[in-house]
Amino acid sequence: AIFAFERLPGRIWREEMGACGSKSSEEKSPKGNDPPAKDDNPENHILGMDDIEDEQLDPKNFECKKLRGETIVRAPGQLKSQAFTIDGCKRCSIFLFDNSAAVTIDDCHDCVFFVGPCESSVFVRDCTGCKMVVACRQFRTRGCKDLEVMLFCAAGQPIIETSEKIAFTSFNYSYFS
């Protein structure tokens, strides 16, 4: 089996191992230095990837670290379905109004978070006194205290490890009025 990796701009790795439906070696792009031809078959496109060509993503656009008393907003289209990291913030309001791959929130105190649709997990570690509105596949906490969480969790129940005084309520937000 051929084990080739193709790097899609900034985010997803796709393996081709000669599985059912893959192209034979004769159908693959010609040898040489020419880049492979663009695939115009809509069935082979990943949802939301068509608008991202060879754009270079700056990792600093996908993190908030050691902020104090700030309000941060990431509008639709800014996160480009990437992972987002929030670390060491105090008394901040952080609003992620875009799809994300995963969100990690570490060591934050007295903050407010809105996390729009997250395709995998939101992991909250060592946070105290925070309020959160979260829509995700999986929600996890570890070492947290005094959280208020309005949650939509597609995988079912949140996973809570060594945390205390966490209040949950149902997600009740809409992007449309």
Image (tube, rainbow, N blue to C red):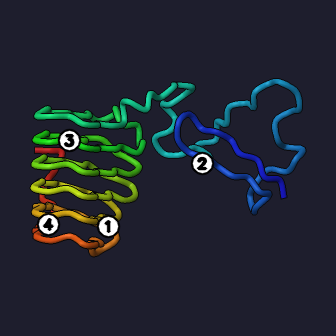
Q: Which residue is mark 4?
A: 170
Secondary element at image label 3: loop
User: Mark 4 or mark 3: which is in front?
Assistant: 3
Q: Which residue is mark 3?
A: 89
Secondary element at image label 2: helix
Q: Residues within 10 Å of mark 4 (few under 14, many from 20)?
A: few
Please indicate whether residue 162 sits to the left or right of residue 111 in the image: right
In the rendered image, residue 148, in percent from the top left (x then y), is placed at: 10, 61
Q: Image quadrant for the N terminus?
A: bottom right
Q: What distance separates the C-alpha of mark 2 from that of mark 1?
A: 26 Å
Residues 45 and 137: in front is: 137
Secondary element at image label 1: loop
Which comes sooner in the sequence, label 4 or label 3? 3
Q: Which residue is mark 1?
A: 154
Q: What distance separates the C-alpha of mark 3 from that of mark 1?
A: 27 Å
Q: Which mark is residue 43?
A: 2
Task: Identify the image quadrant of residue 64.
Answer: top left
Which comes sooner in the sequence, label 3 or label 2? 2
